[in-house]
Image (cartoon, helix red, strand yellow):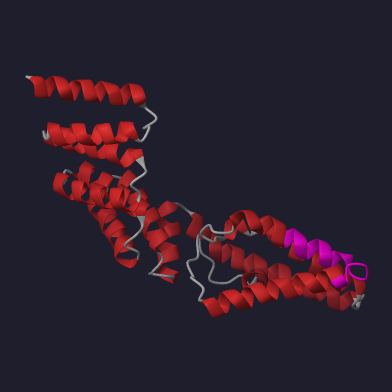
Amino acid sequence: MPKFVWPSDLSICYLNPLGWTAALAGIAAIVGISALAIHFRARAPYVFVGWFWFLLLLLPTTGLVMADRFSYLPFVGLSVAVVWGIAEYRPPRLAASIAAVAVIVVCGVLTVQRVPAWRDSFTLFEDALAKDPGNYVAHQWLGDTLSTARNYPEAIRQYEEALRIYPSFFLAELNCARTYSLYGSVDEAIRHFKAAARLRPEFPGTYKEMGDTLFAKGDLKEAQSYYEKAKSLNYPETTQLNELLRTVKAALAQ
């Protein structure tokens, strides 16, 4: 909500874990504002509509990484409450016009300043990290972008930094393993695949990819065990997995 009032230091995502005190204060504020909106709904229906519009459209993003793009539609509700509230008190037309123009100009300037960050994925994630170097999700996203661009050493550095900040980050472990594999560092790839499997032992794709890496290394017996583990967890590409298992078993039989 503060960025609705003053949209500065915007980012592709925010990671600001709340302590219990802040979380309880936030819940208390939501409950209090909701109670007031309900109490005054007959006198100020625009507050009731605007506030619950905001809450209901924000609800689907609860638990996700918070980002500006999740706030566009919810903030329409707050805008309704503010605009209708100002209109009800009928401010002098000249003063209202000047204020409206000032708001538009300020928002326009901020928009012009913000647009370059969205030039491409590199600038967007680097902008997020410039504002919060501890943003492990942005490190992972930048790593994905660099890996796609085949800048594997720098991608690995980003993944490793994400894992340094948040060691239980499954997606960073998995993508780091994939990138090490592409880079040709098989042992490092295996290490990260194993770490990813420890974080999410129910995810079959990790075992299948680990099997692929071991197969490429020539460790057929280990590859077979990981393929079978992926199969037991209902890996979706069953035809492909069964073909790999037949190939490995035939090679071991020779």
Q: Quadrant of residue 72?
A: bottom right
The magenta stretch is 39-54
Question: Residue 67 or 56: which is nearer the viewer?
Answer: 56
Q: Nearer the viewer, residue 101 or 46?
A: 46
Return the residue nearer the eye: 127 or 239: 239
- Relative to 62, 190 lies left or right: left
Quadrant (top left/top right/bottom left/bottom right) for the N terminus:
bottom right
Residue, x 59% and y 59% (percent of image)?
62
Q: Is 73 a magenta residue?
A: no
Q: In the displayed structure, would residue 82 be above or below residue 22?
A: above
Instruction: Please tell me in which quadrant of the rendered image residue 226 appears.
Output: top left
Which residue is farthest left? 254
For image coordinates 80% across by 75% down, the residue present is 98
Q: Is residue 102 visible?
A: no
Q: Magenta span: helix, strand or loop, mainly?
A: helix
| x then y, percent, for residue 123 | 42, 58
Left/right placement of residue 166 relative to residue 128 reads: left
